Every structure is written in structure tokens, then in C-alpha cells.
Image: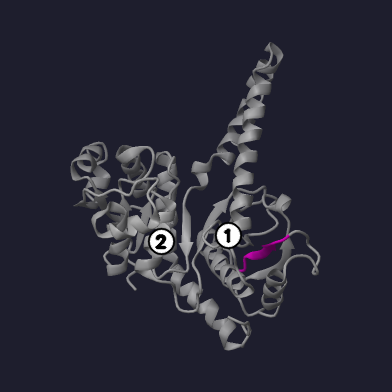
């Protein structure tokens, strides 16, 4: 499949509009000066936004479309209109090989449904998974998946998620053997469901994979930096992600309230301002924006709907890195290693 550095952009997705989407893509273009783009959406609005970004205008073509997937639109309805919407046409460009990846900040459910229908899952993958990079106290971020694409998973799915997550970590963080753990209710071997324990047994018996399987981890260890990849079913993963995001907001709001509660507190804030700036930067979701649908025959990246220009740029950066690393081929090779040694003898 074509892996050229050409990215299809759904210019109409996101809460902040075309202006912010184009500002973000332009910032990403400055980071990756070899990238080219096809911009799908309202041509007049896109051209107006590009007036401020000549570097992006010179590296882009525009495909006009009147259709836009609404934030509240049902996936089934969005699929029926796929060939007339900016989101659907961006994914179609990947299917045709006109682009190597698609980036959208639009409706997550519609994007997932369209991508799965148009691109299909890779050979050897039963279900695609939604993966994202999350901040940690360690030297690297952590790849976490699945974050909501599959609410129920068997052991085979979890093993495939581990393979895909490890390939993503090698591509995004340049790790030779990422440390992989399964999210569980305890770290002891006997803890957890049959599916989790069976998946752990398969991963332990697969030393030929380009990963280091370190067993289980609990929810309070997600940000400790003790793992490079954390694997779960989509139900647990989504709850863990939303809990972590809510905790981050709680901490920043609590600190803001504490530092404005008195004159002494305000003086303390001025003294600790550099540290507070670092904390705010580390917890800013825009710094880790860009979730990936792994396991498809093509790269599709979901930018958060409320992302600012820096966040959109990070989502495009994720797409570019995965194209450069040929993520699909990495996953295919790792799955072949398991199958070759007969390590996936599980009931379908």
C-alpha cells in the first residue's frame, strides 16, 4: 500500500473550525517540510484560512465538498453520506492510495465506522483498536489501547492489541523492545478475568516478539512510567482514560484555587510559576493529541474536537511518524512471528 508522505485532512471537523485546523496543519508542515496535503471541505473557507499560511498553501490541494459530518450524527447516517462529506472523502483518499493517512477532528463514532468499512482490518487482526499517547513521570509517554473501540474483548484481541501497541511504541518513541503490560485489578498472576490471564500466558510464551511483556498493571500505575504500552479492553480503557483526564483537571483547578485564596498564596504562586508552567504544559491534552485507529489497512488519526492549533499539529505529526515508520508492515511482521510458532491457539 502507498506510504508516501501525503496526508488527507478533514478540514471541517473539530469544534474550533477551519481556521484552527489550517493553523495546526501549517504548524505540522513546518515540522515536516516534506509533507503534502489534500484538504477536504468548503473551498472558500479553506482558501481564506490559507491566506495566513503560504507554506501550507504551496504544499496542498483542495477538494471542495459541501457535506459535513455533524458532531451528533449517528455513524450509520454518516456512512450513507460518506462520499459527499469531508470526513468520508478524506478516508476514501487513503483507500485509493492518493494519501497515506487521514486526520480528522470530527465525530469519533462516525470516523471509526467509516474507516473500518472503507479500509477494512488488516490480515491477522480481528478488530481495530483506538490507541493514544498519554503523559507519564518516566522518560517516555505511554501508549494505551483500546480506548473505546471494543467494549468486549477476548484473549486473542488483547494479544493483537499488545502487538499493535508495541509496534506503535517502536515507531513513535523509537524503542527497540517496548515494555508491555495488561491493565488488571491486581498484579498477581491469578487476578483478573480468564481473557486477561489467557492473553498474558500467550504473551509470556512469545519471546520472539519485539516487546518485553512485564505482566499486569493497575489503574493507579498508568502514569508512573513503568510501562511503554498498556493494553485493555475498550470499556476499561475508556473509563481509565476519562478518569485520568478528570484527575488532571481536578489537580490543576485545585492548585489554581489554592494559589488565589490569599495574598500569601499569590506570592507563593509567583515563586513557583516556572514549575506551574511546566505542570500545565505536561498535563495539557493538546501536547498528546492524536489517537490512532490501529489494525486498519491505512493510517487514520483522530484529533480531539476541542484541540487548538498546537493540538492539531500534534495529531498530524502522529500520522506522519506512523507513515514514516510503515506501522502496518511492522504489525504484520509481528503477527507473523506469533502465527509461525503456533502461539495463538485460541477459540475464535
Decide if residue 191 is on the left or right side of residue 105: right
State the predominant SS element of the stretch in magenta.
Answer: strand
Label 1 Cα crowd, 10 Å radius (few <14 / some 14-19 / many 20+) = many
Q: Is residue 199 above or below residue 230?
A: below
Observer able to see residue 346: yes
Q: Is residue 176 above or below residue 36?
A: below
Numbered tag placed on residue 113 in the rendering: 2
Label 2 Cα crowd, 10 Å radius (few <14 / some 14-19 / many 20+) = some
Q: Is residue 104 above or below residue 188?
A: above
The residue identified by callout 1 is 234
Numbered tag placed on residue 83 in the rendering: none
Which quadrant of the figure contains the C terminus?
bottom right
Decide if residue 315 is on the left or right side of residue 58: right
Which quadrant of the figure contains the N terminus?
bottom left
What residue is at 63 percent from the left and 80 percent from the top? 208
Do the numbered discs 1 and 2 sit on residues whose CB atoms are within 8 Å? no
Q: Is residue 66 above or below residue 117?
A: above
Write down the quadrant of residue 48 in the picture.
top left
> Where is residue 184 shown, x and y percent of the image?
72, 61
* Residue stretch in magenta: 177-184
For the residues labelled 1 and 2, the Cα–Cα distance comes to 15 Å
Question: Is residue 248 or residue 316 the one in the foreground?
Answer: 248
Amino acid at each position: 500500500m502507498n506510504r508516501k508522505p501525503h496526508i488527507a485532512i478533514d478540514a471541517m471537523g473539530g469544534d474550533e473550525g477551519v481556521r484552527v485546523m489550517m493553523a495546526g496543519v501549517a504548524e505540522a508542515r513546518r515540522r515536516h517540510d516534506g509533507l503534502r496535503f489534500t484538504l477536504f471541505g468548503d473551498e472558500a473557507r479553506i482558501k481564506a484560512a490559507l491566506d495566513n499560511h503560504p507554506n501550507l498553501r504551496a504544499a496542498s490541494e483542495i477538494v471542495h465538498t459541501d457535506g459535513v459530518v455533524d458532531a451528533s450524527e449517528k455513524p450509520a447516517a454518516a456512512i450513507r453520506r460518506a462520499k459527499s462529506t469531508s470526513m468520508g472523502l478524506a478516508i476514501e483518499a487513503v483507500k485509493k492510495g492518493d494519501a497515506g493517512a487521514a486526520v480528522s477532528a470530527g465525530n469519533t463514532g462516525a470516523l471509526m465506522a467509516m474507516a473500518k468499512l472503507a479500509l477494512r482490518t488488516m490480515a491477522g487482526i480481528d478488530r481495530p483498536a483506538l490507541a493514544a499517547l498519554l503523559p507519564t513521570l518516566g522518560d517516555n509517554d505511554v501508549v494505551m489501547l483500546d480506548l473505546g473501540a471494543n467494549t468486549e474483548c477476548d484473549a486473542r484481541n488483547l494479544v493483537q492489541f499488545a502487538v499493535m501497541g508495541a509496534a506503535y511504541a517502536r515507531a513513535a518513541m523509537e524503542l527497540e523492545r517496548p515494555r508491555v503490560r495488561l491493565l488488571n485489578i491486581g498484579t498477581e498472576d491469578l487476578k483478573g478475568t480468564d481473557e486477561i490471564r489467557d492473553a498474558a500466558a500467550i504473551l509470556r510464551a512469545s519471546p520472539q516478539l519485539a516487546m518485553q511483556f512485564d505482566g499486569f498493571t493497575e489503574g493507579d500505575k498508568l502514569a508512573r512510567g513503568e510501562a511503554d504500552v498498556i493494553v485493555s479492553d475498550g470499556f476499561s480503557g475508556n473509563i481509565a482514560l476519562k478518569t485520568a483526564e478528570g484527575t488532571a483537571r481536578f489537580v490543576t483547578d485545585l492548585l489554581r484555587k489554592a494559589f488565589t485564596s490569599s495574598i500569601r498564596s499569590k506570592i507563593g504562586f509567583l515563586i513557583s510559576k516556572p514549575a506551574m508552567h511546566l505542570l500545565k504544559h505536561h498535563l495539557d491534552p493538546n501536547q498528546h493529541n492524536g489517537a490512532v485507529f490501529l489494525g486498519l489497512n491505512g493510517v487514520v488519526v483522530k484529533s480531539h474536537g476541542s484541540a487548538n492549533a498546537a493540538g492539531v499539529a500534534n495529531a498530524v505529526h502522529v500520522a506522519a511518524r506512523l507513515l514514516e515508520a510503515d506501522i502496518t508492515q511492522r504489525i504484520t511482521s509481528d503477527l507473523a512471528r506469533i502465527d509461525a510458532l503456533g502461539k495463538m491457539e485460541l477459540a475464535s
